[in-house]
Image (cartoon, rainbow, N blue to C red):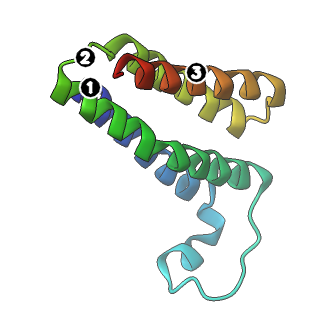
Amino acid sequence: MTTLIVLTATLYLVGIFTQVLLNQNNLNFLIGNREGEVEESAMVGRTRRANNNLLESLPVFFALAIVSLILEVDNYNLAMYWLGLRFLYFLTYVFGLIYIRTLLWFGALVCLIMMGVALL
């Protein structure tokens, strides 16, 4: 489970760095004080939104994963499925595949719910 927690944090960091890599034409803005507005490409915007969406579910995942470790509840497979679905969600969001993205998001949500139920 510890490995999945670290991989999940890595996924978030990859999302941050992907935004920077895709937004190199605004590098001065990114390394500056970020005052004002900057125009970003559609893909950069989707990458940012995908990462923000992951950020919304990270506290729940981390809490469930850590409590699973403490209580020695085997939620490893569910956590692995959640991470895989979130990775695929990130890719489909970045590339604009809307319907598949929604199904992946729902599947990841179901994994979190099942992790929580396993702790009861």
Query: Closer to the camera, 2 or 91?
Result: 2
Image coords of residue 17 (percent x, y): 47, 52
Residue tagged 3: 110
Q: Give the residue pinned by disc 1.
A: 68
Contact flag, marks 2 and 1 (Cβ < 8 Å): yes
Q: Position of residue 115 (x, y in %)?
A: 42, 21
Q: Depth check: 37 or 102 in front? A: 102
Residue annotated with mark 2? 73
In the figure, is residue 97 to the left or right of 74?
A: right
Point 31% across, 26% down: residue: 4
Quadrant of the rendered image containing residue 6: top left
Q: Is residue 62 above or below residue 33?
A: above
User: Is 79 displayed left or right of 106 in the figure?
Assistant: left
Q: Given the image, on which type of amino acid does mark 2 rest?
A: Val
Dot 2 lies on which element? loop
Badge 3 density bin: few <14, some 14–19, many ≥20, Cα 10 Å: some
Which tag, 2 or 1, sits closer to the chain's start?
A: 1
Mark 2 to mark 1 CA distance (whole Å): 5 Å
